[in-house]
Image: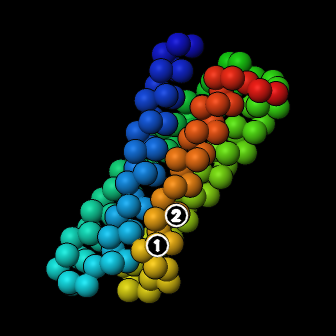
Amino acid sequence: MYWIKALHIVFVISWFAGLFYLPRIFVNLAMEQEPAAYARLILMAQKLFRFMLPLAVLALIFGIWLWQGYGISGGWMHAKLTLVALLVAYHHYCGRLLKQFIAGQNRHSHIWYRWFNEVPVLVLFAVVILVVVKPF
């Protein structure tokens, strides 16, 4: 079970790296005026998003595997699973935002994306506290 836990942690960390960086690319896209630079940022964002998807899937697969081995006990696990569902929704929403950028239909300012970029940091903080401290 330790191997499964280790793989889960590695894929979660890798997925989070993408969740931290993709919205940062969105900040730059929202500010970019030059078409060549915009196209380069779009390409970077597309490649990153395609790379993030299997990492997210593997993190979830190994997490479910752990869940089957240990079960769900305590309110902390229910809270963690709620936050994981929020992260999956955030990941999906990042994909929708990327499609809007590709279509040239960005609806937000770079300041909005700077705040949007903080969501996974807050979720990570909460999940680590829940898993380590198990406050309830």
Q: Is residue 102 above or below residue 72?
A: below
Q: Is residue 74 above or below residue 36?
A: above
Q: Would you say 49 lies left or right of 92 here?
A: left
Which quarter shows the C terminus?
top right
The three-letter code of the residue at mark 1 reads Ile
Q: Would you say 63 lies left or right of 30 here?
A: right
Residue, disc 1: 111
Give the image location of residue 101, x and y in percent.
39, 78
* Residue 72 in view, yes or no: no
Give the image location of residue 30, x and y in percent.
37, 77
Give the image location of residue 23, x and y in percent.
43, 62
Residue lying at 20% horizontally and 84% vertically, measured from the top left: 34
The three-letter code of the residue at mark 2 reads Trp
* Residue 83 in view, yes or no: yes
Bin the neighbour count of mark 1 within 10 Å (Cα to Cα): few under 14, some 14-19, many 20 and up: few
- Circles 2 and 1, Cβ within 8 Å, touching? The answer is yes
Residue, disc 2: 115
